Amino acid sequence: MFRRHLVDWGLLTLSFIILACVLLMWLAGQTSSLIFNSITVIISLGVLAGCIIPQIALTWLIIFLTTIGSASLLLGYVVMPTFQKLLLLSTFPIIASLTALAKQIIGAWGWIDRNRTDINNYIAHYNPVVKLKSKYDATHLYHKEVRFIINEEKAKLRIDLNMIQWVHSKQFRQFHEEEYKETLHSISKILKDLRFPSEQIYYLGNETFLIISYALDQETLTYKNAQTQASLKKLSSFQALPQYKWASLHINRKNVYDYMELNDALRYLTREMETDLVIEYLKGVESCD
């Protein structure tokens, strides 16, 4: 998205440069050939200066030339209409400034293209909206945990996975993009504030969060999950209360071979969430009857 906006701004700036050149040339064409030729030379110098001179030096050059030009044309005795004087004075600052801006934007565009691999790797590892690591990192950690559960038989290692999904969020996003991002950030903040330091929190995309807990006894885990659910239910978004689906999975040496890959565990958690959704719907139908 940032790259798209950068391209749009670059094209817009180039359009302004072309439009400014055409307009200045047209205005100069309404005057004498001497003014027209002078404007042509000044436009060329403005484009050249904007391309090769650093921005700070260009700023001082514009101030210096504008001051000298104003003193010569406006304060000095030069027989020329005021309109032509202003046209000569304004051409260089306008063209040089627009060219420098276009160079800066296109330079940033080029930097993004040159560093595309690093940027894509960063996005793959980290979500800037919720400020959490992504599924990529969760997969690596899960593989390590599974390996230790299998190899360290005497240690009796175990992990618990809790997956939380904000439901009906896509419809909300269509009409309230900024509030959608704020809500995702708020959910992330609640999880980071409430969960134990030993737990790992990841954002899987699609408004879904994954919590990996290590060797917590069932009573402690139940308490922490209930506390988290209560806090999430209090979160309001644009005068509405977000709804969530929640699923848990306990993995130890007995069932670890059923969930050798993180995707296997996530499929189970997804089925659990869908099952709970159907059960809640049936309960609602029965209560209506």
Image (spheres, rainbow, N blue to C red):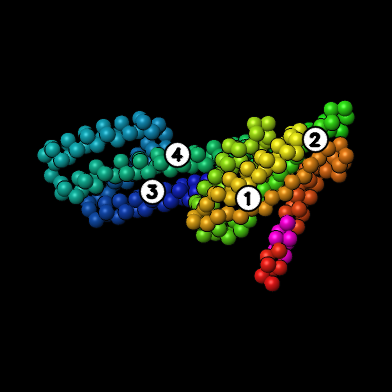
Tag 2 residue: 158
Secondary structure state at the residue bearing disc 2: loop
On residue 17, the disc is 3
Estimate the spatial distance between the alpha carbons at disc 1 and disc 3, rounded to whole Å: 43 Å
Q: Is residue 190 part of the magenta span, yes or no? A: no
Residue neighbourhood size for the residue with mark 1, other residues' Cα within 10 Å, grouped as few (<14), some (14–19), many (≥20): some
Q: In the image, what residue occupies the spot 17% across and 40% down?
A: 73
Q: Which residues are magenta?
A: 276-282
* Image marks 3 and 2: residues in contact by CB distance under 8 Å: no
Which residue type does callout 3 highlight? Answer: Ile
Instruction: Name the mark nearer the viewer: 1 or 3.
Output: 1
Upstream in sequence: badge 3 or badge 2: 3
* Rendering coords of residue 200 (x, y %): 68, 36
Residue neighbourhood size for the residue with mark 4, other residues' Cα within 10 Å, grouped as few (<14), some (14–19), many (≥20): some
Q: In the image, what residue occupies the spot 29% across and 44% down?
A: 91
Give the left or right position of residue 213, taking residue 101 as reference.
right
Q: Quadrant of the C terminus?
A: bottom right
Tag 1 residue: 207
Q: In the image, what residue occupies the spot 74% across and 46% down?
A: 248
Tag 4 residue: 104
User: From this viewpoint, is residue 180 visible?
Assistant: yes
Upstream in sequence: badge 1 or badge 3: 3
